[in-house]
Image (tube, rainbow, N blue to C red):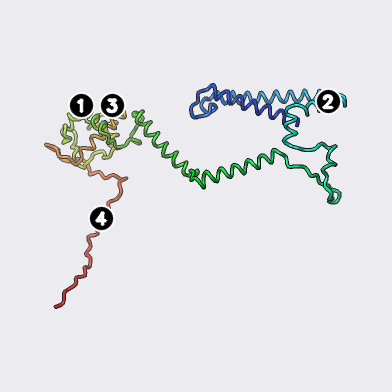
């Protein structure tokens, strides 16, 4: 009892303080204690202070109690029992006073050890009933109405996270780099890429990609590797040292480089008016699925010869 009352006071203080932080701080979907790095030390500091104050109060009470006479101690204990927390404690335990134990003692005797017929503590009974209700709700939610189990919820959250990441990338296009760039297929991106190409690249590669000072972009050959990642790197960092294309990362942002790279890759397989001879090697995407070769071996065919 002496420990229970301070425990309840500290618990109520912690709940009220936590709720005030949640109310005052606009933390969105996160807890305020997670959103703001200053709130956690303040909250725990206040909680430690509350525990320290309870220790001081308990020490003072203990000294006062020890200094009282027998009659004074009885009055003090009666005041404790008549308090709100004292009544709540007694109600949760539903125990009899020592003076009343004779009324509930059982008849059987085990080597001098006797047993009391106490009721189960109400707090335990309430917890037992609550667990039954929880079990029924859980059974109905997940086994009758086909609720999502943890694995399904995880998959949905991962899928939603991917959507959120893509949306974030669209809203923050300059975060893309050579390791994360993907081939853009939206008409708006390809149009923007064409504008950049005509303005900055066509002078060396020609408008139709046939090549001039720069290499032909319509054939499958690449000097520094094809594919969106290699082309992005080449445009961003420039071509071979001492010769080749300059680096464009000082004039174009990451999104613009991704757009023009995607547009450049669209030249492959087209026909140029005056194509330049191929340079470099034919590039094969190492991540592409292998192409199954058709079985050209001779197959035995059974021919039915009609009889006359």
Q: Is residue 21 visible?
A: yes
Closest to the camera, between mark 3 and mark 2, is 2
- Residue of label 1: 199
Marks 1 and 3 close (CB-CB < 8 Å): no
Using the numbered discs, state the Cα–Cα distance from disc 4 to disc 1 in whole angstroms. 43 Å
The residue at 69%/38% (across/down) is 123
Task: First in sequence, mark 4 or 1: give its number.
Answer: 1
The residue at 28%/44% (across/down) is 285
Marks 2 and 4 close (CB-CB < 8 Å): no
Closest to the camera, between mark 2 and mark 1, is 2
Assign a secondary structure to mark 2: helix
- Residue of label 3: 252
- Quadrant that contains the C terminus: bottom left
231 over 54 or under it: above or below: below
Displayed quadrant of residue 8:
top right
Using the numbered discs, state the Cα–Cα distance from disc 1 to disc 3 in whole angstroms. 12 Å
The residue at 55%/43% (across/down) is 138
- Residue of label 2: 75
Using the numbered discs, state the Cα–Cα distance from disc 2 to disc 4 in whole angstroms. 98 Å
The foreground one among 57 and 232 is 57
Task: First in sequence, mark 2 or 4: give its number.
Answer: 2
Q: Local crowd at mark 1 within 10 Å, few (<14), some, or many (≥20)? A: few
Task: First in sequence, mark 1 or 3: give its number.
Answer: 1
- Residue of label 4: 293
The residue at 60%/24% (across/down) is 17
Using the numbered discs, state the Cα–Cα distance from disc 2 to disc 1 in whole angstroms. 96 Å
Using the numbered discs, state the Cα–Cα distance from disc 3 to disc 4 in whole angstroms. 43 Å
Q: Local crowd at mark 4 within 10 Å, few (<14), some, or many (≥20)? A: few
Using the numbered discs, state the Cα–Cα distance from disc 3 to disc 2 in whole angstroms. 85 Å
């Amino acid at each position: 009892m002496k420990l229970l009352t301070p425990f309840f006071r500290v618990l109520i203080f912690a709940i009220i303080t936590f709720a005030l932080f949640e109310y005052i701080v606009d933390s969105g979907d996160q807890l305020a204690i997670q959103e703001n790095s200053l709130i956690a030390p303040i909250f725990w500091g206040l909680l430690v202070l509350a525990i320290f104050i309870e220790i001081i109060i308990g020490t003072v009470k203990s000294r006062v109690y020890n200094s009282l006479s027998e009659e004074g101690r009885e009055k003090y204990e009666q005041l404790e029992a008549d308090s709100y927390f004292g009544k709540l404690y007694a109600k949760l335990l539903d125990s009899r006073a020592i003076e009343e134990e004779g009324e509930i003692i059982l008849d059987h005797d085990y080597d001098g050890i006797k047993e009391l017929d106490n009721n189960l503590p109400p707090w335990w009974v309430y917890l037992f009933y609550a667990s039954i209700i929880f079990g029924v709700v859980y059974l109905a939610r997940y086994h009758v109405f086909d609720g999502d189990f943890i694995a399904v919820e995880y998959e949905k959250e991962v899928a939603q996270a991917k959507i959120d990441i893509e949306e974030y990338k669209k809203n923050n296009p300059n975060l893309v780099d050579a390791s994360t760039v993907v081939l853009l297929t939206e008409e708006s991106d390809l149009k923007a890429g064409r504008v950049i190409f005509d303005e900055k690249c066509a002078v060396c590669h020609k408008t139709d990609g046939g090549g001039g000072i720069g290499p032909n972009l319509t054939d499958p050959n690449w000097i520094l590797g094809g594919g969106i990642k290699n082309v992005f790197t080449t445009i961003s960092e420039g071509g071979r040292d001492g010769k080749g294309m300059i680096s464009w990362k000082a004039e174009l942002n990451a999104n613009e480089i991704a757009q023009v790279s995607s547009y450049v890759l669209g030249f492959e397989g087209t026909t140029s008016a005056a194509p330049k001879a191929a340079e470099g090697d034919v590039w094969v995407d190492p991540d592409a699925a292998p192409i199954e070769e058709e079985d050209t071996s001779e197959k035995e065919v059974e021919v039915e010869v009609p009889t006359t």
